[in-house]
Amino acid sequence: MKAFEKNIRKAEPYVPGEQPQERAIKLNTNENPYPPAPGVERVLREMDAGRLRLYPDPTADVLVSALAEFYGVGKDQIFVGVGSDDVLSMCFLTFFNSEKPIFFPDVTYSFYKVWAGLYRIPYVCREVDENFRIVKEDYYSENGGVIFPNPNAPTGIYEELDFVEDILKHNQDVVVIVDEAYIDFAGRSALELIDRYENLIVVQTFSKARSMAGMRIGYAIGNPDLIRCLNDVKYSFNSYTMNLTSLLCGAEAVKDRDYFEKTVHKIISTREWAKERLGDLGFQFLDSRANFIFATHPDHDASQLFEALREQRIFVRFFGDGRIRRYLRITVGTREEMQALFDFFERYMRKQRRIL
C-alpha cells in the first residue's frame, strides 16, 4: 500500500439497476412507463436557454412553493434535493450522529448500508419476519435513529399508518425517517403524522409516480426545525443542488393533479392484473403495494429466469442475495410490456416441460 492510500476513504458502493441503451422492455428499475405531465414538455419547449447562464435559485422556491401548496404545508417544512437519494443522504449526514446504532430492516433499500458506511454511522439491521414484514417491536430498544421504507423495497409490502405511528411513539428521542418512494401506489402517507411528531421526516420522490426519474427530484417534509437543519447541511455542502430545468419542470408536474392521479390509477390497475397473470403461471409473490411485484416460482430458478429474460431484451431485477435470492423484482410497465413478459414466461415454461 502506498503511503497516501491509508488516508483514502473506502466505500462499498450501491449497485444500480442495469440501464440498457438499446431497445428493450425495461422492468428493472421501477421507473414509470408513462410520460410526465404534459406541462413538463411545454416547459422544456418554451424555456429560455439564456437563463442557463445564471445560477439557479438556491432556495428552490418555485418547486418548494408548488409542493407546499399541493400538500398543504408551509414552505419551511419542505426540503428538496437531487432525487430522494440525495435527500436521504443529507438526512443520514444531518440526523444520524449518535454513537448508538441506527435501525433499519435487513431486507430493504440497500443504499442505507452504503450511506451508513460512507458516513461511519453505526447500524443494526433488524430482521424482517418469515413473510418479509417489518417487526415493529424490534424498533423499541435504544438507538441512534430509525429509517424504513413504506412500502418496503424490494418487497413492496405496505404497513398501515397505525403501524408507522407505533414505531414513532417508541422512538420520540431520535429522528425517524419514513422513505415513501412508492407511497402513491399504496395507501395513507405518514405525512398525516407530521404535525403530531416533531421528530418525523417523510421522504418522497418524482422518480416513480410523477414519471421524472431522469430529472432527479426528491423532497423531504417535516417540522421547520428539522428542515432548517437539513438546509444548513446542504448549504455547507453545495448551495446550488437543484438545476433550473428540474425546478421549473418539477413545479409544473406538481400542478397537474388530475394527470398524476390518472397515471397512478393506470399503474395500480395493471399491477393487480399482473398479479392475476403471475398467479396463473404458478408464481408466488408478496402483496405488493408499490409499482413492482416481488415474485418467485417454485419450479424455476430465479437466476436462470433472469438470464433467459435478459437474452430476450426483457430486463427485470435479480438480487441473488441471502433471503431474497429466489426472487425477481418486476417493475409494472404498460399493459403491452407486461403481456410480452407473460408471453415469454409461457414459452419458457413450455420449453422447460418438454426438456423434462
Image (cartoon, helix red, strand yellow):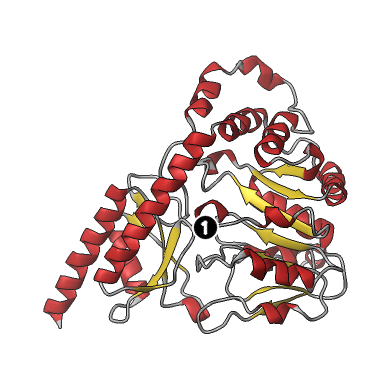
Looking at the image, which residue is at 59% across and 69% down?
108
Q: Quadrant of residue 314?
A: bottom left
**Percent of width and height locating residue 57:** 76, 28
Residue 167 as seen in the image, left or right of residue 237: left
Tell me if residue 222 comes above or below residue 298 in the rendering.
Answer: above
Tag 1 secondary structure: loop
Q: Residue at 61% of width from left, 15% of height from top?
A: 48
- As drawn, which residue projects farthest toward the left? 354
Neighbour tally class for label 1: few under 14, some 14-19, many 20 plus, Cα within 10 Å:
many
Q: Percent from the top left, x then y, of residue 102?
A: 77, 72
Residue situated in front as seen by the camera: 19 or 195: 195
Residue 12 seen from this side: no
Query: Considering the image in quadrants, where does the C terminus appear?
Result: bottom left
Residue 122 in the image, given as x and y percentages of width and height: 79, 74
Q: Quadrant of residue 51?
A: top right
Three-letter amino acid code at the position of disc 1: Ala
Q: Which residue is mark 1?
A: 186
The vertical placement of 186 against 172, above or below, is: above
The picture places residue 293, in percent across and down from the top left corner, at: 42, 64
Using residue 125 as the reference point, say whether residue 277 is left or right of it.
left
User: Is residue 212 among the parts visible in the rendering?
Assistant: yes
- Residue 235 sits in which quadrant? top right
